[in-house]
Image: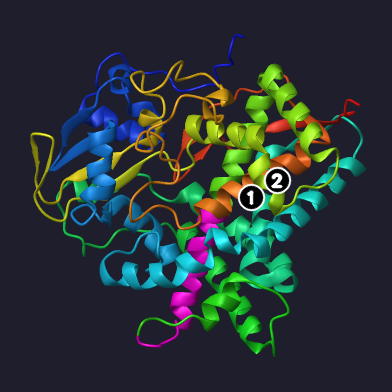
Amino acid sequence: MNAFVPPYPPRPAQSLPVLELLRRSRRNLLTIFHDRAFEQQLMSIQVLSRRVFICNSPDTVRHALVTGNASFERKSPQMRHALKPLLGDGLFISDGETWRTRRKIVAPIVHGSRMPDFAPIMVEAALELRDRWAANADGSEVDVLSEMAHLTAEIICRTIFGRALGAAAAHEIIDGFRDYQRVVGQLDLFSFLGLPEWFPRLQAPAIRRSVRRIGATLEGIIAAYRARVAADEASVMGMLLDATDETGAKLPVEALRNEAATIFLAGHETTANCLAWTWYMLSQAPEVEAKLQAALDAELAGRAPAQADVPRLVYTRAVIEEALRLYPPVPLLVREAGQEERLRRQVVPAGSLVMVIPWLLHRHRGHWDQPDSFIPERFLPDAKPIDKCIYVPFGIGPRVCAGLTFGLTEAILCLATLAQSFTLRLKPGTVVEPVCRLTLRPGDALPMSVHRRARQP
């Protein structure tokens, strides 16, 4: 079959001059990569006062994120300064002893073994969306990016705070996160100029308003949760409140807020974007869509999926994994070298930036057949094995996303629930272009029409 090739920005024939690279980075990071970058294995460039290395092969990725993690543990200045107002010392941007202590607390809470507690919440929220769509006239138009954002926000809020408190918080927090991402800076120019870490970074008033809005909501819910005599269900907040570090100390309120914000950002925005891209690509690839529907009909026969079904939803998982390959929610993983290191034969000075870029790695012509095409079959069990260091939508190594299983399970169950009942079609004339700010999104909106489908007997 002729596989669908979803959109990607034009690729310059040659590497860009530094000033043009910086200019484009502020608008859309995906536009800076020249065509040969999708073939090279290790690249380096001097950007003002910083040396930047790009790892684009299994061995260099493995060294940067796994075997050499002690040297490359720290996130980039850009990521730290972009997210610190919102996440504080949360797990996503912390390092050193703070990261190690928090990881030990948070990782077990969102571990795969907890999915039997969380999967029913995921399906419950997806069924509510299914019912809302079903109540609309056939062919009604929705903004799928917004719909998936609210779906995953409902799920993560109910998961963090429980059903009673979570539902009220979802809209307030999602609006705050959306506004924050719209205005946050995409380039920490000060760090490339060699200015010290303590040098103050200017923040737009809109950033401070978003931070206050999200922080006040989270702190209010934490206080309300603590005031409840007993939790009536499993929730992340209940587990965080009960968790202790190695000394037996519990997390202070600020740390609880930071970790709740981190889990929300990681568990809401990334899965929402993945599902939005999935719906778009299915609408443009009728053969893949038909295979998915047939597989769901055969396995579920119209009933709602459950956690026990996830291992059997093989094609659904393949569709999600291919969407994560083509549009990794976090398309750049950037670390700062804490000490002098080596990548292959190249010396990496302390303070250099070392990048693993899923956007490049997942579309590398030496690692993938038809790398720009939408082919879920490459992730089926009988397909050619994929090196785990060339497919890193959740990272890899000690700092792999703690919520990997949560996010993948959520995407599979939501898609399986909704795709049994509906097909979605892109609004005619809509131009879809990937835009990378903090995460990789299909622009600011994704207008699609929702159509009921009749399952084949």
Above/below status of 105 relative to 177: below
Which residue is at 54% across, 35% downward?
Answer: 321
Which residue is at 80% across, 32% downward?
Answer: 298
Query: 204 or 419: which is nearer to us?
Result: 419
Q: Exactly how many numbered labels are in the figure?
A: 2
Q: Is residue 261 magenta?
A: yes
Residue bearing mark 1: 410
Q: Is residue 33 magenta?
A: no
Above/below status of 411 relative to 210: above
Evaluate whether residue 429 shows in this view.
no
Stretch of the chain drawn in magenta: 247-267
Above/below status of 456 relative to 5: below
Name the kind of residue labelled 1 in the image. Answer: Glu
Residue bearing mark 2: 414
Q: Secondary structure at mark 2?
A: helix
Locate residue 329, reporting x and y percent: 49, 41
Evaluate whether residue 53 shows in this view.
yes
Which residue is at 82% across, 45% downward?
Answer: 130
